[in-house]
Image (cartoon, rainbow, N blue to C red):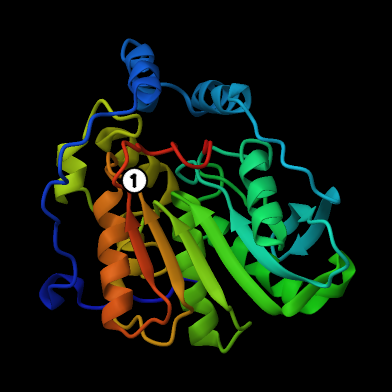
């Protein structure tokens, strides 16, 4: 389902942002980063080993385990086969508004389990039915497989919301990191294809562009968890070739037009190579007239993964 991008280079749409004011890292975060300093660079390891290490670490993190009425694993049919989903139902009578969630992990890592605690929290605190999508991962399934699965789940929920006590007329999308990329891209696709209507989008430190030369990519290239080299590796696993990275379906920031998209909450982390990806996308959405837009760049000492226990 790729869609084309605009003449990105000549349009001057992507600018780097000045260095953020120095804020001391939270001691606990600094300690965790120091503990990782001697480990092998993830991009030098086999994919299976990277998954085992990073996903194992995510599952060991402390959890909030916020109480819900029900958590249920289901399978829906996609064009390429079954798609696993996990449905989080808050307490109450419903039908509930629906948040379709895509986990992060560079399109390579992450599972329904690594983002279970985050989805529980979103469901309870927003009083929404959260549906986490177990999309196909790269490199076994390259672009646009993950996006196709996420779009298929969105379409299924619009048509079958009643089966999960949801309201198909109140759909939102959300995702962190690479999941934020999928959430942004599916909004573009839904707009261009006439539906399903999406009420809002929550993009948590999203990947919005196949490019690595922003200020934040250089300022936080190493030492802050997600490195510049690791992001390059993630993109190499995801794309079939460089031309894919110029598609708005892979790089939403490259879309020629961001008008008529759902209201967006874009959250960025202060110490993150992806900070400028999110800042630039939020700025372009605002320029295009997006409603109820709040771009939040943390004034606390957050790095990538600080908020969401992301994989």
Q: Kindly state the secondary structure of the residue where label 1 is placed.
A: loop
Q: Which residue is mark 1?
A: 269
Residue 70: percent from left, percent from top: 86, 50
Q: Is residue 19 above or below residue 12?
A: above
Q: Is residue 289 above or below residue 82?
A: below
Name the residue located 18 percent from the left edge and 66 percent from the top edge.
14
Q: Is residue 19 left or right of residue 38?
A: left
Name the residue located 66 percent from the left edge and 35 percent from the top edge.
64
Name the residue located 61 percent from the left edge and 49 percent from the top edge.
136
**Tag count:** 1
Residue 293: percent from left, percent from top: 39, 73
Residue 169: percent from left, percent from top: 71, 82
Task: Classify residue 90 by image quadrant.
Answer: bottom right
Q: Is residue 155 left or right of residue 5?
A: right
Residue 279: percent from left, percent from top: 27, 60
Name the residue located 83 percent from the left edge and 53 percent from the top edge.
74
Local crowd at mark 1 within 10 Å, few (<14), some, or many (≥20)?
many
């Amino acid at each position: 389902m790729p869609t084309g991008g605009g003449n990105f280079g000549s349009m001057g749409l992507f600018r780097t942002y000045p260095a953020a004011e120095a804020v001391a890292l939270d001691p606990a975060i600094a300690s965790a980063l120091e503990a990782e300093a001697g480990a092998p660079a993830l991009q030098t390891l086999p994919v299976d080993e990277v998954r085992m290490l990073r996903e194992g670490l995510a599952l060991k993190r402390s959890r909030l385990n916020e109480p819900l009425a029900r958590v249920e694993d289901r399978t829906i049919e996609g064009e390429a086969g079954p798609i696993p989903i996990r449905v989080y139902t808050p307490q109450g009578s419903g039908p509930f508004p629906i948040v379709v969630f895509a986990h992060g992990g560079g399109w390579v890592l992450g599972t329904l389990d690594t983002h279970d605690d985050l989805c529980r929290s979103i469901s309870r605190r927003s009083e929404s039915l959260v549906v986490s999508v177990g999309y196909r991962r790269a490199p076994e399934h390259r672009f646009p497989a993950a996006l196709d699965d996420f779009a298929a789940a969105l379409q299924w929920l619009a048509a079958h919301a009643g089966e999960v006590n949801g309201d198909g007329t109140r759909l939102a999308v959300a995702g962190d990191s690479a999941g934020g990329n999928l959430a942004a891209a599916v909004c573009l696709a839904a707009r261009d294809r006439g539906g399903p209507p999406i009420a809002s989008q929550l993009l948590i430190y999203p990947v919005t562009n196949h490019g690595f030369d922003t200020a934040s990519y250089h300022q936080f290239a190493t030492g802050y968890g997600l490195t510049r080299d690791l992001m390059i590796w993630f993109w190499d696993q995801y794309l079939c070739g460089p031309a894919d990275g110029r598609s708005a379906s892979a790089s939403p920031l490259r879309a020629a037009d961001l008008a008529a998209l759902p209201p967006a909450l874009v959250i960025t982390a202060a110490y993150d190579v992806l900070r400028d990806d999110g800042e630039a996308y939020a700025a372009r959405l605002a320029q295009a007239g997006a409603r109820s837009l709040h771009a939040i760049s943390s004034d606390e000492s957050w790095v990538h993964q600080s908020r969401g226990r992301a994989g």
